[in-house]
Image (spheres, grey):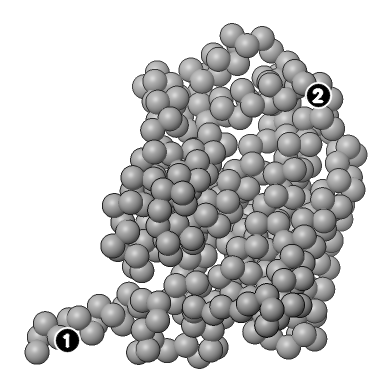
Amino acid sequence: MRESTMMDADTMVLPRLGDAAVEDPWGEDRPRRVTGRAAPGGRRWRIAAWLVPAVLMGALGAARITTSGPSAGELATRRAATSHWPGIGAALAGDEVALGPYQLLMRGWAALFGAADLALRVPSLLAMVGAAALVGALAARIATPAAGLSAGVVFAVLPTSIRYAQEAQPYAPAMFAAVLATWLLVPALDRPSARRLVPYAGSVLLLGLCQPVALLLLAGHGWVVLAFRRRGALRWLAAVALGLLPVAALLGSALRDGGHLASGARPAAAVLAAMPGELFGAAALGGVLAGLALFSLPLRYAAAICTAWALVPALALLALAQAVPVWSAANLLFTVPAWAVLGGVALSRARAAGTLAVLALVALLGVAAQLPS
C-alpha cells in the first residue's frame, strides 16, 4: 500500500504526457496530430506563426538601426573587430573572457563587410529575426499556430528585442541560440536519436560561445528532463557534454588566469526591483507578461518547458549571485523569449478581441518605453 501511494504521489508531482489523471482544464493535452489534407489552412497558419514575427522583427529592428551612436559595449566590439588577430586571441586571456568568442566572430565579419556601425549591427539584427521566427515556431509546436503567432509578435515588439537587434553585442546571438536550443530540445526528448541530439549539442555549443552565463538555460532543460523524460536523461547529458566540451576547452585556461564569465551586482532589494523594467524595457511590460504567464503554469509538459526556461536560470543566477556579483538583466536576456512563448500560449486561449487588445497594449507600452524621457 505504501509503495502504491508513493507511486501515485510521484505521478501527481511529476506528471507525464498522456496520464489521464493529470487535470487538463484547457483541453490541450498532447499528442495532437492534424494532417495537411484534413486542415489545409493549418499549414498556412503554421507558416504565419514564424514568418509574421520574423518580418515584424526585421522591420522594427531595421527602422532606426543607424540613428543611435555606439554604446560602450559596441565600442569594445568595434575595437576588437578592427584589431589584429593576435590581439583578438589575447581577449580570451583577459578579464572579459565571455566576450572573446563573440569578438572572434565579429573580427571575421568585419574583415568581410567592414566595421561601420551598420555593418557591425547586422549580425544582431539577423539573430533577432531568427529568434522571433523560432519563438513563433516553438509556441506553435508546443501549443497551437495561434499561440505561435501571438508569442512571436509579443517578442518582436518588446523594447529589449528591438534594442538588442540594433546593438553590436552578444546578447542577440545568445537569445537566438537559447530559442534554438529549446526548439531542438522538444523533438530530441520526444523521439531521441543521434540525428536529433547532435543538432541540440550544436545549439548548446553556440549558446556557450555567445554568452557563457546563458548556459544556465541547461538547468531549466535538465529540470524538464528529470520531470518528464527521465529515461532519456543519459542521452541528454551526453548531448550536453558534447556541446560543452569545446566551450570548456576554449574558456578554461582563461578562467584559470583570472578572467571572469559574467559581471553584475549583488541582488539587493533595489536591484531586484529594477529587474523587470531592465529585462523587458518597461516595468509595466514585465507585469503584463508575468500575468499572462500565470495562465500557462500548469505543470504539463508543453507549458513546463518554457516555465522552466523562464524561472530556473533566474533562480540559479540568484543563488550564484549570493557568492559572486553576477546579477544583471543582461545575464538573463536569454530568458525573454520564454516569457513571450508563455504569453502567446495564454493569449491563444482568449477570444480574438481579447488577444488583439492585449497585443495592442503590449505594443503601446513598448512604444512608450522607447520615447525620449
Amino acid found under the numbered disc labelled 1: Thr
| Earlier-in-chain disc, 1 versus 2 | 1
x and y, in percent, of residue 284 in the image: 70, 68
Q: Residue at x 41, y 48 (%)?
A: 194
For label 1, the crowd category at 10 Å Cα-Cα, with few meaning under 14, some 14 to 19 and many 20 or more, is few
Q: Please, is residue 342 above or below residue 237 in the view?
A: below
Q: Report, in whole angstroms, how far the alpha carbon at label 1 lies from the one at label 2.
A: 65 Å
Residue highlighted by disc 2:
113
Secondary element at tag 2 = helix
Q: Residue at x 23, y 84 (%)?
A: 8
Q: Quadrant of residue 349?
A: bottom right
Labelled disc at residue 63: none
Secondary element at tag 1 = helix
- Front-most of residues 2 and 41: 41
* Quadrant (top left, top right, bottom left, bottom right) of the C terminus: bottom right
Q: Residue at x 81, y 24 (%)?
A: 113
Residue highlighted by disc 1:
5
